[in-house]
Image (cartoon, helix red, strand yellow):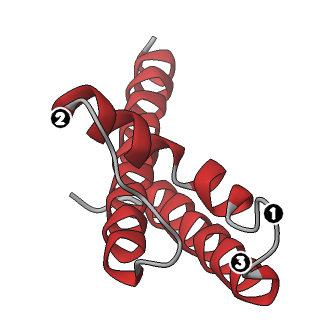
Amino acid sequence: MKSATGAVLAALYALAFAAAYFQYLRRAGEFLADGPLMLVALPYTLTILKLFGSVDLSADNLKTVLAAALFCVVFAYAIGALIEKLLRAVIGALIAR
């Protein structure tokens, strides 16, 4: 599946994830330093929580941060592709009238 909208959303999400992680690195050790990263990773957190009952996401663990980033980027791409497909179908139906 090729989707320009999905690619743009995925790229923006990846940038948001990188920005949140670098902000965490600058503020590591402070109270709620990983707060922005946890907000950006919310789709991952809610999905893992629903599937497994608990989630262990910490900005200190780069492996879980990368897994969350990959999940969220793929999720953003899928949502963008779905939106693009729906819009193309609606516009195609309107043009066909």
Q: Which mark is residue 24?
A: 3
Number of numbered callouts drawn:
3
Residue 33 placement (x, y as % from top left): 76, 68
Of the two numbered discs 2 and 1 on the same chain, state the one appearing first in sequence.
1
Of residue 12 and residue 53, the one placed in the foreground of this image is: 53
Q: Of tags 3 and 1, which is closer to the observer?
A: 1
**Alpha carbons under labels 3 and 2: distance apart:** 26 Å
User: Residue 68 vs residue 95: left or right?
Assistant: left
Residue 66 placement (x, y as % from top left): 37, 76
**Alpha carbons under labels 2 and 1: distance apart:** 28 Å
Kindly indicate whether the residue at mark 1 contacts the one at mark 3 (C-beta within 8 angstroms). no
Instruction: Determine the secondary structure under disc 3.
Output: helix
The residue where tag 2 is placed is 52
Of the two numbered discs 3 and 2 on the same chain, state the one appearing first in sequence.
3
The residue where tag 1 is placed is 31
Q: Using the rendered view, name the quadrant where residue 24 is placed.
A: bottom right
Vertical order, 96 against 71 (above or below): above
Q: Using the rendered view, name the quadrant where residue 27 is placed.
A: bottom right
Q: Residues within 10 Å of mark 3 (few under 14, many from 20)?
A: many
User: Residue 41 vs residue 53: left or right?
Assistant: right
Q: Of tags 2 and 1, which is closer to the observer?
A: 1
Q: Residue at x 38, y 62 (%)?
A: 68
